[in-house]
Image: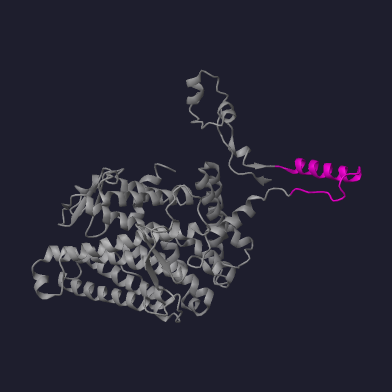
Amino acid sequence: MVYTGKPSAGCENCRKAKKSCDQQLPACGRCARLGKACGGYRDLSTLIFKDETPNFVRRTSSQSDKSQNGGSSAAVFRQPSPDIDTVAKQFFFEQFVTPNYLAFLDGVPPDDFLMKFIMPCALAAIATRNDDAHGRERARRCYVDAITATQAALRDPDKRIAWEHKTSMIFWKHHVDGSAQVLQLRGRGQIRTKAGSALFRELRDNIVINALMAEVEVPDYVVEWTQLLEFDPLQTPSDQITLLTARAASIRAAFRTGSKSDEELAELADTLEEDLLSWSERTLAPGSFCAFDNVRNPNSPHACNGNRHVYKSPQAYRHWNKWRCLRVLLSRTQEALWRRSWPVLVQSHRIHDSEHYKSIRNQMVAELCIASAWAFGNDSSAEPSKGSISYSYLMVMGLTVAGTCLLENLASPIRSPNGNRMILVNEPLHTDPFSQTSTQLARVTERLDYIADKVGIRWAAPMSKFLKGDANIYFDLSRSRVVNNEELEEALYGQVLSLDEVVNLWVMEDP
């Protein structure tokens, strides 16, 4: 059986005419319009994988007969198409593994156990790129097998920190509870080796980002183990950002629960802002592996508004995007404290006004858009380049955060039941060609659509729909979170959802 790619499922008339077939029932629209009899559609499951053995035998026999009958003395054998396992493996290592994402898998020969985790990741992305429902179903089945294999490995205390299981754990990273349990099961000893510390960093990042967006404390062991990691010029900046993110999550958690006074929170936020600026100064210093330059290059296909980033290392792109998102979220919390505690905090703290915090967000939006152009270029019709999936995973959150800042500038804020500033995202604000902010928002949604449709990361699509106003959703500016419109009036503080949960609002409708 060989993988032949995704064929057309359209009717015979449309295929012969090389026209797109809408596959309507009982007849496609084109046949109905032309008055032709529509012969129905093909079953893709019987076409994607074909048994090419008879054809291969026939071709090789023909070449052999020619050689024996005086033909060319060197028979030419055509190689059969690679099977789906080979296609998936090649796709995974080309598109997922880069110096700034899953780098520790580079050069690792995948055994049968690791292939259980490569297959669902690669097949899901391939199926999404080709809009292949059968491929998605195959990926789901492989995913179940992978999770089952991981659970079995974790039950064995002697094997759960072995290398072959260690590489597979990375694919739990999008399941936050699973990631936390895996790290705790493996214990602090995992960070003593290079491979163990690399795995810890990957799983840790998702736990920390989730805590930040969910407004909860980062687990103590994550902070403690991060502080124990050995110095690495490429990874230590990320460790420092992780610790800064943990502090931001703690501030957001206290802001949500009211466990600290506004004066205490303002002091913590001011100190964190100073430390974020100090991190950027150190990281931009001469000789830093994670520095970047902002150069003027209007003719570059990877420039945004004529500006382009030049990173000293691929890892720097990842670290700086985290820093930019952190500054946006922190500035919103600081502005919320300023608004609800004015003029008390203004008199007792070095607190700025709303324009200061708005200027921070505008600067971060510009940098996030330039970073996106660096990763993907400006051609939305271009085929994704090598490593596109790894860059996309790192860019979806940044683009979404940038989009919410642009919405903030375009929409008219209202007050939530608890006094926070909110905007209602229920109409397209990205379609005004005479507004620079609207045009920039259109660019952000276009990039998210590219990531969803071309690169193959489906959860970028609902983020784009949210920013386009395809649902009645309130966005709480103070907390950088979305609120269901229907639930807003049912609870005193509104039922707040994380951006991750927004994905499910459309995923359930669009499987």
The answer to whether residue 297 is above or below residue 27 is below
Q: How is the image coloured?
A: one colour
Q: Residue furthest top?
A: 35
> What segment is highlighted magenta in the picture?
51-78
495 over 114 or under it: above or below: above
| Quadrant (top left, top right, bottom left, bottom right) of the C terminus | top left
Determine the residue positioned at 26% across, 66% down: 330
| Above or below for 74 versus 14 | below
Percent x, y of residue 5: 60, 44
Figure disc tally: 0
Residue at x-position 91% and y-position 45%: 68
Q: Is residue 145 left or right of residue 348?
A: right
Front residue (pair 162, 313): 313
Q: Nearer the viewer, residue 47 or 315?
A: 315
Q: Is residue 65 magenta?
A: yes
Viewer-nearest residue: 203 or 278: 278
**Residue 393 place in picture, x, y as percent:** 44, 59
Write down the quadrant of residue 279 in the picture.
bottom left
Whether residue 463 is visible here, answered yes or no, is yes
* Quadrant the N terminus occupies: top right
In the image, 432: left or right of 202? left
What residue lies at 36% left-to-right and 49% top-to-bottom?
A: 445
Residue 62: x %, y % from top left: 83, 41
Q: Is residue 296 left or right of residue 115?
A: left
Please say whether residue 215 is one of the residues in the magenta stretch: no
Depth order, front residue of 249/387: 387
Residue 483 seen in render: no
Q: Position of residue 211 (x, y in %)?
A: 34, 65
Q: For this view, does 377 lie left or right of residue 51?
A: left
